[in-house]
Amino acid sequence: MKNILVVNASNRKKGNSYALEQRITEQLNGRAEVTTFRIGEKKVNACLACDACKAQHTPSCIQKDDFTALIPEIDSCDAMLILAPVHWDQFPAQLKAFLDRTYSFMDFTQPDLSMAGRKDKKVAGYFFCGFGPVDAYTNMVETNLKSFATAGFTETKAHVAGDANAPASILEKPDDLKAADEMVEWLLA
Ligand SMILES: Cc1cc2nc3c(=O)[nH]c(=O)nc-3n(C[C@H](O)[C@H](O)[C@H](O)COP(=O)(O)O)c2cc1C
């Protein structure tokens, strides 16, 4: 069974990321081992850029917070699914902090700059926005997802659901739900 890490980066508990998290968790039940990391309920500090992690060749961080505790799971999972809102045309702040902290996987002595134990993992990003340009946001998500390659996520897939301001409105959008279903199958494949 695949081991899938679901990262929910919304603070809106009745919102779209939470609604889709519930639907996808039900779909994955019995088909994958799922670990859910809801960033809003966790402590994910900013990267200190202290380079303490560069003194070693396995991923680590001197900070004692929930990101550091998650490093082994990030390193060993088969795939990661990020569910998140677009905030001011970008990753929401806590998710950006999460991405920054994957600097702890960067190894300048390696040709691919990565000390990840596994480098064959998939990362999918399913994002929601209210009014912005879906094409531009999809590019933004794809660009950011590529940065997870340092942590060993070398295959990426992105989807942005537009016109999704109303809480849980994703559940009434057949095309976006189909994209979510396809994303789940891609993660499991
Ligand atoms: C602080 C903040 C910034 C936002 N910025 C944007 C934005 O730049 N473009 C956009 O289309 N929607 C923006 N939105 C709307 C959210 O992306 C949208 O409501 C989304 O569905 C929220 O997802 P969630 O319910 O999973 O939290 C913003 C919402 C908030 C609270």
Image (cartoon, rainbow, N blue to C red):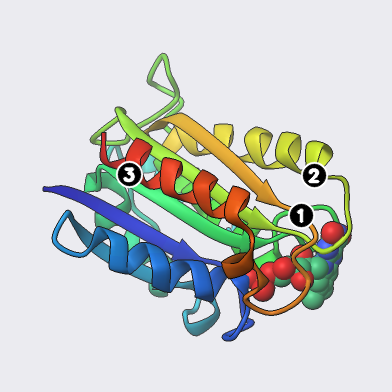
* Label at residue 162: 1
User: Disc 3 and disc 1: Cα gap in Å?
Assistant: 24 Å
Q: Nearer the viewer, mark 3 or mark 1?
A: 1
Q: What's under tag 3, amino acid-wise?
A: Ala
Residue 71 against residue 184 in the figure, above or below: below
Residue at 70% in and 65% down: 93
Residue 153 in sight in this render: yes
* Label at residue 134: 2
Residue at 63% in and 78% down: 15
The residue pinned by badge 3 equals 79
Q: Residues within 10 Å of mark 3 (few under 14, many from 20)?
A: many
User: Disc 1 and disc 2: Cα gap in Å?
Assistant: 6 Å
Quadrant of residue 185 within the rendered picture:
top left
Residue at 64% in and 35% down: 142
Residue 120 location (% of width, % of height):
29, 28
Residue 10 location (% of width, % of height):
61, 73
Q: What's under tag 1, amino acid-wise?
A: Gly
Residue at 41% in and 73% down: 22
* Label at residue 30: none
Quarter of the C terminus within the rendering: top left
Residue 38 against residue 92 in the figure, above or below: below
